[in-house]
Each structure stands twice: as C-alpha cells, then as structure tokens.
Amino acid sequence: MQANDVRVLKSAAIPTLGVGAVAVVVSLLVAGGGGALGAALGVLLVAVFFSISVVAVSYAARVSPQMMAIAAMVSYLVKVVVIMAMLVAFRDTTLWNTQAFAWSVVAGTLVWTAFEVRAFMKTKMLYVDPDAKVPGQGD
C-alpha cells in the first residue's frame, strides 16, 4: 500500500470512528443498550467495508490501471451483495435497535465519503511518471 493510500485511509477512518462514537452515545441515550449495539455495529460495518475497498483498489493499482478499475467495481459489487445478505438475515432481529444501526450506517457512509474525497483532493499525485522510458527516445 502506498503512502498516499494510507493517508487517505486514515483521513477517512478517524472522522468516521469519531462520528461512530457520538452515534453510540446518542443511541445509548435514546434507545438504550440495543441502540448502542446497533450504532456500534453500523459504524463497524462501514469502517470494515470501506477499508477493504481502499486496500483492494490500492493493491490492484500496483498491477495496472485497468485492474484498479476492476477491483473497485468488484469490491463494490461484493459489498452490496454482502450488505443485502446481512440485512435479509438480520431483518427481524431484536438483538439491537435496527434504526440506530441504519442511521449510523448512513452517517458513517456520508462522513467516510466526504473525508475520503477531501483526502484525495489534498493528495498531490503525479500525472506523469518522470522515470518512464519512451520508446524511440534515447536508449
């Protein structure tokens, strides 16, 4: 994983976990222990899924730009399928408050996405590889 990718991952994960802590406290006050558990699981789900995407895309970027795009699409598809399966499996659960879970997933996703975009905007990335060899030019 490149330094830029680690920076983006930390820039998105830290604010998301901060919002998650606030969501857990608010859910605990509003909906009790089940609400706190639901909020914690929701933020954990967001953090794990988005982290997996960043790692997969970062790894694929070392292979080729085409693999990076494929990794992004496949990781997105896998996340959607797994989230749908989890929602179907736990739709009638009474272990946690499902509204606290849902709202923490929404809040975590919005915060992660906003700070990931912010990190990419602030990252200085080369558009041209200065060490690239051009065929027919020199050696």
Image (spheres, rainbow, N blue to C red):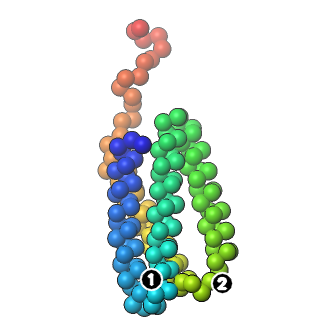
Distance between the Cα atoms at labels 1 and 2?
18 Å
The crowd level at tag 2 (other Cα within 10 Å; few <14, some 14-19, many 20+) is few
Q: Residue furthest top?
A: 139
Could you say which quadrant of the image residue 77 lies in? Answer: bottom right
Q: Mark 2 points at which residue?
A: 92
Q: Which amino acid does label 2 sit on?
A: Asp
Vertical arrangement, residue 9 with respect to residue 35, above or below: above
Report the quarter where the N terminus lies.
top left
Could you say which quadrant of the image residue 117 lies in? Answer: bottom left
Helix, strand or loop at mark 2: loop
Q: Nearer the viewer, residue 122 or 108?
A: 108
Q: Name the residue under label 1.
A: 36
Q: Which residue is drawn at 65% across and 62% down?
A: 81
Q: In the image, 42: left or right of 74? A: left
Helix, strand or loop at mark 1: helix
Image coordinates of residue 75 in percent, x first then y, are: 58, 53
Q: Residue at x 52, y 41 (%)?
A: 60
Image coordinates of residue 115 in percent, x first then y, are: 37, 61
Q: Which of 95 and 99 is in front in this view?
A: 95
**Sequence-first disc among 1 and 2:** 1
Image coordinates of residue 9 in percent, x first then y, are: 39, 54
Residue 74: which disc? none
Q: Can residue 43 be seen by looking at this rendering? A: yes
Image coordinates of residue 36 in percent, x first then y, are: 45, 83
Q: Which residue is drawn at 60% across and 44% down?
A: 70
Q: What residue type is labelled 1?
A: Ala
The crowd level at tag 1 (other Cα within 10 Å; few <14, some 14-19, many 20+) is many
Report the quarter where the C terminus lies.
top left
Q: Which residue is drawn at 51% across and 67% down?
A: 45
